[in-house]
Image (cartoon, rainbow, N blue to C red):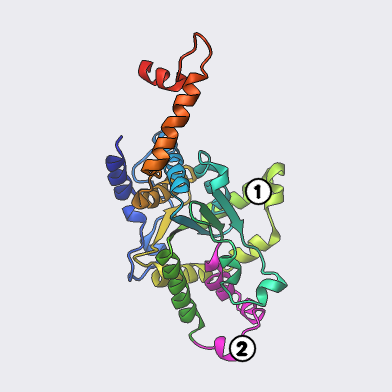
Amino acid sequence: MSDGRAAKRIAKFIKPLRVKPGSRVDLAADFDPRYKAGMNKREGVELLRTGVSLLSEYQARLAAQDTYGVLLCLQALDAGGKDGTIRHVMSGVNPQGVHVSSFKVPSAEELDHDFLWRYAQRLPARGDIGIFNRSHYEEVLVVRVHPENLDRQKLPEEAKGQGVWLRRYREINDWERYLTDNGIKVVKIFLNLSKEEQRTRFLKRIDLPEKNWKFSAADIRERERWDDYQEAFSDMLSATSTPRAPWYVVPADRKWFARICAAAVLAHTLIGIDPHYPTVDEQAGKELLAAKRRLEKEAPEGAARDPYAANRRTD
């Protein structure tokens, strides 16, 4: 499939997942966690393989061009599938060009800085893909649902009053605009898990000894705040899906479909950048030809002067 056809197919596929900038989101009413676009799992496995191959090609170009970076932000409730999504979607890319950052409870040093400081320390370099496993959006999700965390951030009283979340939405939008202005493309995916599917995955973590380590009693306490999180997610999606950095709500009840969607969203971003391998100038071209002639003269008797070129002619 040509890049142009692939680009059109991917854009059509992810369009229902995109949060239209300026729209008002009601997560429960607007997005179905079990949506699968009429696809079956067998079709999905093949499509994921194609997506991973496409990502590998474009990531190599991105690294070689060394002009743009890509920041992928993954948000989800517990058991939403962030780790598995990262593992499967990035399985074919060069690990040197991908960096994953997970953000836990802020340290004392991080609490002595502004709320975006620790995230800015982990931004991708040009040519790299950076993945935030949970991201700066925790500051308007977990911190909002648990306002005692806001008190721990040592803010002056006037910064904690009415309108704090609206201010943070604006500050996040401004920061992401700054990043995109500087060549860092921001990709934002929310893995949308149903309450029943989360319950099932929690039980699996309890029932299977090899998964016990994944479960925490805190997961159940957070589940009790389900409605609060749904409201926080809805407000976040409404306020921070922008033309330059839109949100994509990925149905997460079927892991295989969630991974296809995530790969498609990331591929769409890379295709939009359209990175190319650098071309050399005239002087460098002459030096390449001189080096080629020298290497060809070193060919042993009976060997092809240029084995690579000879193999290309016979393929």
Q: Quadrant of the C terminus?
A: top left
Residue 16 lies in quadrant:
bottom left
**Residue at position x 43%, y 72% from top?**
173
**Picture coordinates of residue 241, whole percent (x, y):** 39, 67
- Magenta span includes 155: yes
- Residue located beneath label 1 in the image: 205
Q: Secondary structure at mark 1?
A: helix
- Residue located beneath label 2 in the image: 156
**Residue at position x 38%, y 48% from top?**
275
Residue 247 lies in quadrant:
bottom left
| Magenta region | 135-162
Mark 2 surroundings within 10 Å by alpha-carbon count, few (fewer than 14), some (14 through 19), many (20 or more): few
**Picture coordinates of residue 119, whole percent (x, y):** 57, 66
Along the line of sight, the residue nearer the viewer: 211 or 137: 137
Q: Secondary structure at mark 2?
A: loop
Label 2 is placed on what type of residue? Pro
Mark 1 surroundings within 10 Å by alpha-carbon count, few (fewer than 14), some (14 through 19), many (20 or more): some
Relative side of 258 to 210, left or right: left
Label 1 is placed on what type of residue? Arg
Relative side of 240 to 155, left or right: left
Residue occupying the far bottom of the picture: 158
